Image (tube, grey):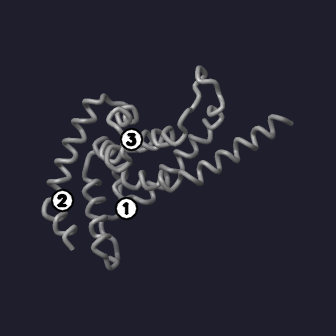
């Protein structure tokens, strides 16, 4: 009886966590995927599924593998799910390059689309580093741990990725921001 109540309490905690964090996870996934909303939703669902299976670890002793920061752990799971997806051969398949209709764009949405498009042209690991460092405002060490790389590699990747973004956006960024 006590275990059923404990399980119900854990499920309630998880539902509250998932409700509170799913928006932030989706935004991070959206930038990681270069604006692919469907893949972003899939990554968030996969992340929350993995979090659900590990949720009982919140109440373990620290020596037994307790999760001390569930939000940070979820972010790490999301980034690793994204990187795993990018390693698959089918990850580069796209049903169509041209959309049938183009909606009217405001200057702000044009800037956002230009940034998302430029992010989409970066290699997956570079994109993950840029999103974690500059969108999520993570430290070099946190980013390195999340992408399983060294701090020096993260600094190098972020420097090269930002240089490539500047090249890709070039005058377009100044033009979109000036509007």
Q: Secondary structure at mark 2?
A: helix
Please say if 15 is above or below 52: below
Q: Quadrant of residue 80?
A: top left
Q: Is residue 25 left or right of residue 149?
A: right
Mark 3 or 1, closer to the camera: 3
Q: Secondary structure at mark 3?
A: helix
Give the CA separation, mark 3 to mark 1.
21 Å
Coordinates of residue 126 in the picture (x, y in percent): 28, 43
Coordinates of residue 125 in the picture (x, y in percent): 31, 41
Give the CA separation, mark 1 to mark 2.
25 Å
Residue tagged 2:
169
Residue 9's label in the rendered image is none
Residue at 47% x, 53% y: name it: 24
Mark 2 or 3, closer to the camera: 2
Q: Earlier in the sequence, mark 3 or mark 1?
A: 3
Q: Residues within 10 Å of mark 3 (few under 14, many from 20)?
A: some
Residue at 14% x, 59% y: name it: 170
Coordinates of residue 119 in the picture (x, y in percent): 28, 53
Coordinates of residue 103 in the picture (x, y in percent): 34, 78
Give the CA separation, mark 2 to mark 3.
24 Å
Q: Residues within 10 Å of mark 1 (few under 14, many from 20)?
A: few
Q: Earlier in the sequence, mark 2 or mark 3?
A: 3
Quarter of the figure that contains the N terminus: top right
Residue tagged 3:
83
Quarter of the figure that contains the C terminus: bottom left
Residue contact between numbered discs 1 and 2, judged by CB atoms under 8 Å = no
């Amino acid at each position: 009886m006590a275990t059923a109540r404990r399980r119900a309490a854990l499920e309630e905690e998880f539902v509250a966590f998932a409700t509170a964090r799913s928006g932030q996870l989706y935004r991070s996934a959206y930038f990681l995927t270069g604006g692919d909303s469907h893949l972003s939703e899939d990554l968030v669902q996969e992340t929350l599924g993995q979090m659900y299976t590990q949720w009982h670890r919140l109440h373990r002793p620290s020596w037994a593998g307790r999760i001390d920061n569930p939000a940070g752990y979820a972010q790490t799971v999301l980034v690793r799910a994204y990187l795993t997806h990018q390693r698959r051969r089918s990850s580069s398949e796209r049903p169509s390059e041209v959309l049938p209709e183009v909606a009217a764009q405001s200057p702000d949405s044009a800037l956002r689309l230009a940034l998302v498009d430029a992010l989409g042209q970066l290699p997956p690991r570079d994109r993950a580093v840029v999103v974690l460092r500059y969108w999520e405002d993570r430290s070099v060490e946190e980013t390195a741990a999340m992408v399983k790389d060294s701090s020096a590699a993260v600094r190098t990747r972020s420097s090269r990725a930002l240089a490539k973004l500047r090249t890709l956006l070039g005058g377009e960024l100044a033009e979109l921001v000036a509007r």
